[in-house]
């Protein structure tokens, strides 16, 4: 397959991750400067006043360790999303924030839920499951790379691991990522055909080479040898040039 048709590096590969991460750090810096918490803008489950938090919560973090732990995976996973799934990247990000946030609003504990970890789980879920579904070796390799890097995140989707962590947002993110992997369609990835026998309509009976083998694979009916070209030997020749002489000059 000509990967250039689907996988292309462009400034959006690093600009879009920065577009998500920089506002997070700006809001965190604003909170630190003002010494004022914006947690009240987070998701408050099953309260109408908590619905706007679906949009605001990914940009809110409680402390430096919280935002620092979310920043590297967001940068890496969004860059991978844009590079390998360019046409779907914005849909995954925007709908991922909305759907994972709504699931958190429905099933979450009665407290404010903040942080971008739900979006991290959206990205992990989508990239992992979509890569396996495409069965294209580059994307499958990307899926396994995500598992190696972030496979440990699976434990934080269940209650009781860490009460300070919003497992509801993590579970909502993983569910959203899986749903998008199923619903969002990708191109039909396939390798370029290098040989005739790779084509689905290949008929060996019409192949001149395969006609030289019997059913047991024995080489039969070899073609007659092609006659070797005969080079004509050029015989050296002698050419004579006659110059007629004037008889009158010869009599003198």
Image: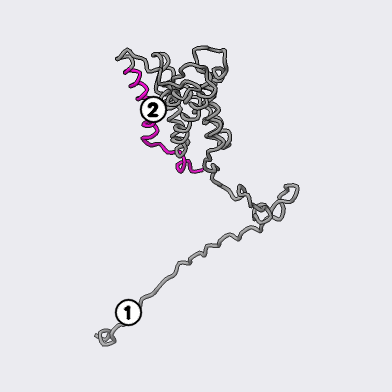
Q: Residues within 10 Å of mark 2 (few under 14, many from 20)?
A: some
Report x, y in % for residue 48: 46, 25
State which tag comes first along the sequence, 2 or 1.
2
Q: Which residue is mark 1?
A: 243
Seen in the picture, residue 215 relative to 146 is either above or below; the reply is below
Q: How far is disc 2 from disc 1 in space, using C-alphas?
A: 100 Å
Would residue 216 appear left or right of 231 to someone viewing this image?
A: right
Q: Residues within 10 Å of mark 1 (few under 14, many from 20)?
A: few
Q: Quadrant of the C terminus?
A: bottom left
Report x, y in % for residue 198: 61, 47
Seen in the picture, residue 210 relative to 113 is either above or below; the reply is below
Residue found at x 45% / y 67%: 236
Residue found at x 55% / y 62%: 230
**Closer to viewer: mark 2 or mark 1:** 2
Q: Is residue 73 visible?
A: no
Report x, y in % for residue 60: 40, 20
Q: Which residue is mark 2?
A: 20
Q: Nearer the viewer, residue 126 or 158?
A: 158
Q: Nearer the viewer, residue 110 or 166?
A: 110
Mark 1 element type? loop
Q: What main secondary structure does the magenta stretch of the protein show? A: helix
Q: Is residue 188 visible?
A: yes
Q: Is residue 211 magenta?
A: no
Segment colored magenta: 1-30
Q: Is residue 3 magenta?
A: yes
Mark 2 element type? helix
Would residue 155 appear left or right of 210 to someone viewing this image?
A: left
Q: Quadrant of residue 141?
A: top right
């Amino acid at each position: 397959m000509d990967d250039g048709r689907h996988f292309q590096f462009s400034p959006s590969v690093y600009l879009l991750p920065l577009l998500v991460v920089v506002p997070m750090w700006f809001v965190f810096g604003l909170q630190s400067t003002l010494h004022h918490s914006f947690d009240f803008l987070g998701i408050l489950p099953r309260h109408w006043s908590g619905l706007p938090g679906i949009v605001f919560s990914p940009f809110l973090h409680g402390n430096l360790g919280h935002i620092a732990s979310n920043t590297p995976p967001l940068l890496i996973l969004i860059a991978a999303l844009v590079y390998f799934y360019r046409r779907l990247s914005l849909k995954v990000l925007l709908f991922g924030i909305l759907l994972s946030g709504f699931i958190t609003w429905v099933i979450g504990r009665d407290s404010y839920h903040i942080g971008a970890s739900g979006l991290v789980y959206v990205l992990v879920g989508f990239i992992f499951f979509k890569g396996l579904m495409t069965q294209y070796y580059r994307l499958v390799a990307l899926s396994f790379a995500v598992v190696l890097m972030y496979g440990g995140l699976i434990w934080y989707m269940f209650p009781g691991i860490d009460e300070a962590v919003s497992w509801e947002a993590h579970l909502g993110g993983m569910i959203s990522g899986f749903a998008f992997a199923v619903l969002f369609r990708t191109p039909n990835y396939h390798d370029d055909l290098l040989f005739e026998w790779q084509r689905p309509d290949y008929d060996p009976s019409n192949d001149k080479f395969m006609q030289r083998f019997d059913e047991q694979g024995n080489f039969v009916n070899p073609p007659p040898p092609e006659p070797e070209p005969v080079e004509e030997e050029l015989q050296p020749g002698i050419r004579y040039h006659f110059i007629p002489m004037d008889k009158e000059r010869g009599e003198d």
